[in-house]
Image (cartoon, rainbow, N blue to C red):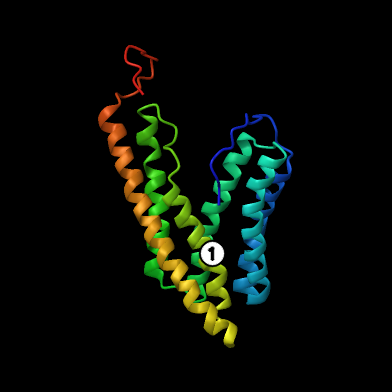
C-alpha cells in the first residue's frame, strides 16, 4: 500500500518515472480486470491481474525510494489507484456473487464519507489529515483479501484453502477500515472545533495550526 513519504525532497515537476509508470499501469489494468471477471469470466487471468497489481503497488514505493524518484504526481496516483481498486473490485465481486452487497456498501460508504470531510477540512485551511497506519493496514488487508477470495471460487483443494483465508483478510480489513474511519472523523471534528475558519480575504490575524 502507499507508504509514508521517504525523507527525500520530491520533485514536483517529475512525471516520467518508473513508480509513476507502474501506478498508471495499475490504473489501466482496472478495466482489464473488470472485462476478464465479468465478461469473459476468466477468473484465472483476473487473478493474475490482481496479483500483478498488488506486486506493482508494493514495488512502486520501494523503487521511488531506491531511485529517488518520489514526486507529487506519484503521491496522488498511488492512493488514487488503491481507492479505485477498493471500490471497483467489490462491485465486480458483488455482480459475480462473491461478496454480499451490504458489505460492499459498507466499504464504499466509508470512502464516500471520508471524501465528504474534505471541504470541512479545507474550510479550516487543512488540505489533508495525517495518514493513519491503521488505515493503511486496513487497505492492505482488503487488497490481500481480493485475490484470496477469487482463488476461493476454484472447485479444488486450492479453493477450499483460499476461501477462509480470503474471508479472514476481509473481516480484518473491514474492521480496520471502519476503525480508521472513526479516527479520521474524530480528527476532523477536532480540527473544526480548535481551528478558526479560513477567511477568503486572507486574514492572518490568527494563524494557529
Q: Does residue 154 appear anywhere in the picture?
A: no
Tag 1's secondary structure? helix
Q: Quadrant of residue 201?
A: top left
Pick out the residue farthest to the bottom. 156
Residue drawn at point x = 59 percent, y = 72 percent: 38
**Residue at the extreme top of the image, as rendered:** 205
**For the C terminus, which image quadrant?**
top left
Left or right: 118 in relation to 71: left
Q: Is residue 154 above or below residue 143?
A: below
- Asked where in the image residue 49 lies, by quadrant, the reply is bottom right
Q: Say which of 71 and 127 sits in front.
A: 71
* Residue drawn at x 62%, y 31% as measured from the top left: 8
Query: Is residue 191 rendered to the left or right of residue 130?
Result: left
The residue under the point 66% across, 40% down is 65
In the image, residue 1 sits, relative to residue 96, either above or below, namely above
Q: Residue at x 45, y 42 (%)?
A: 131
Q: Percent from the top left, x then y, of residue 190? A: 28, 35
Report the number of discs: 1
- Residue 151 image offset from top left, x and y in percent: 58, 76
Q: Whole-percent x and y of residue 15? A: 70, 36
Report the residue marked by disc 1: 144
Looking at the image, residue 8 lies above or below residue 176: above
* Residue 167 coordinates in the image, percent (x, y): 45, 73
Task: Please state which of residues 4 and 12 is positioned toward the viewer in this rendering.
Answer: 4
Q: Is residue 169 visible?
A: yes
How packed is label 1: few (under 14 Cα within 10 Å), some, or many (20 or more)? many
Q: Which residue occupies the foreground of this view, 27 or 39?
A: 27
Amino acid at each position: 500500500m502507499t507508504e509514508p513519504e521517504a525523507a527525500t525532497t520530491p520533485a514536483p515537476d517529475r512525471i516520467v518515472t518508473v513508480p509513476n509508470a507502474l501506478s498508471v499501469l495499475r490504473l489501466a489494468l482496472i478495466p482489464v480486470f473488470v472485462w476478464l471477471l465479468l465478461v469473459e469470466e476468466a477468473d484465472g487471468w483476473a487473478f493474475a491481474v490482481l496479483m500483478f497489481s498488488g506486486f506493482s503497488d508494493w514495488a512502486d514505493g520501494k523503487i521511488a525510494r531506491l531511485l529517488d524518484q518520489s514526486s507529487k504526481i506519484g503521491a496522488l496516483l498511488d492512493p488514487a489507484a488503491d481507492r479505485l481498486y477498493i471500490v471497483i473490485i467489490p462491485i465486480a465481486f458483488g455482480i459475480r456473487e462473491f461478496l454480499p452487497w451490504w458489505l460492499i456498501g459498507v466499504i464504499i460508504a466509508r470512502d464516500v464519507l471520508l471524501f465528504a470531510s474534505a471541504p470541512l477540512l479545507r474550510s479550516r485551511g487543512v488540505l489533508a489529515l495525517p495518514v493513519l497506519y491503521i488505515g493503511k493496514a486496513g487497505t492492505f488487508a482488503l487488497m490481500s483479501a481480493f485475490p484470496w477470495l477469487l482463488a476461493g471460487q476454484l472447485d479444488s483443494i486450492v479453493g477450499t484453502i483460499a476461501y477462509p483465508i480470503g474471508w479472514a483478510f476481509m473481516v480484518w480489513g473491514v474492521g480496520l477500515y471502519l476503525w480508521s474511519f472513526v479516527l479520521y472523523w474524530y480528527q476532523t471534528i477536532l480540527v473544526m472545533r480548535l481551528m478558526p475558519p479560513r477567511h477568503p480575504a486572507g486574514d492572518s490575524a490568527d494563524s494557529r495550526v
